[in-house]
């Protein structure tokens, strides 16, 4: 799996200061997507064990609130093994940090995905340009913030 961005001190994609990973690859191609460069599965850099170790190291800093994984789309079938390993490892190494994940797919279509066993908050649904707004943590009003863990 490739990724197009790794922001170690992100304040836009979830509460507090977060580590945000932007995976490469999306087949949904939402009209008006703000991150079209993330559609290419071969874009960016290769995600390696060193990348994961760097994420874990940063997440262990006390002022970091959690981990956000966006894209592209982290729930593309091609990403399953890598994303599953990432979220499982993050929860094991830093269980007190929250994991937020963005997907263009509806929760009802992905709720059986084992990746979600490790995700605290899911932002679901495709971006819809006609529903675009100044919304917290999402691009259009059809997208939902779903708390998977209490």
Image: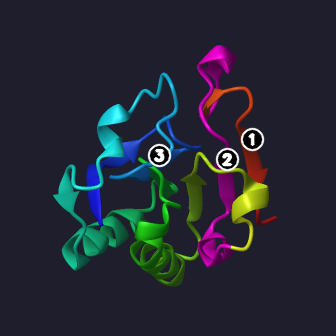
Looking at the rendered image, the quarter that the C terminus falls into is: bottom right
Residue that badge 1 annotates = 144
Q: Is residue 10 above or below residue 135?
A: below
> From mark 2 to mark 3, how far is it between C-alphas?
21 Å
Residue range (magenta): 113-137
The residue that disc 2 covers is: 124
Task: Give residue 136's quadrant in the image.
Answer: top right
Going from N to C along the chain, the mark reached first, 2 or 3, is 3
The residue wearing badge 3 is 17
30 or 94: nearer the viewer: 30
In percent of the image, x 73 and y 74: which residue is there?
112
Count of labels in the image: 3
Q: Quadrant of residue 61?
A: bottom left
SS state under label 1: strand
Q: Is residue 12 left or right of residue 133?
A: left
- State which tag comes first along the sequence, 2 or 1: 2
At label 2, counting other C-alpha atoms closer than 10 Å, the crowd grade (few under 14, some 14-19, many 20 or more) is many
Which percent across, then down, holds residue 120? 67, 63
């Amino acid at each position: 799996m490739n990724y197009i961005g790794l922001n170690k001190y992100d304040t836009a994609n979830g509460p507090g200061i977060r580590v945000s990973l932007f995976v490469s690859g999306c087949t949904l191609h939402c009209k008006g997507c703000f991150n079209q460069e993330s559609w290419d599965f071969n874009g960016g850099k290769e995600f390696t064990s060193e990348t994961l170790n760097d994420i874990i190291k940063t997440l262990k800093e006390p002022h970091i609130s959690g981990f956000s994984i966006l894209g592209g789309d982290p729930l593309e079938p091609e990403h399953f093994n890598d994303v599953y390993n990432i979220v499982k490892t993050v929860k094991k190494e830093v269980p007190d940090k929250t994991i937020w994940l963005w997907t263009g797919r509806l929760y009802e279509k992905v709720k059986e995905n084992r990746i979600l066993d490790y995700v605290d908050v899911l932002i679901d649904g495709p971006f819809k340009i006609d529903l675009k707004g100044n919304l917290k943590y999402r691009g259009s009003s059809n997208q939902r913030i779903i708390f998977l863990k209490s």
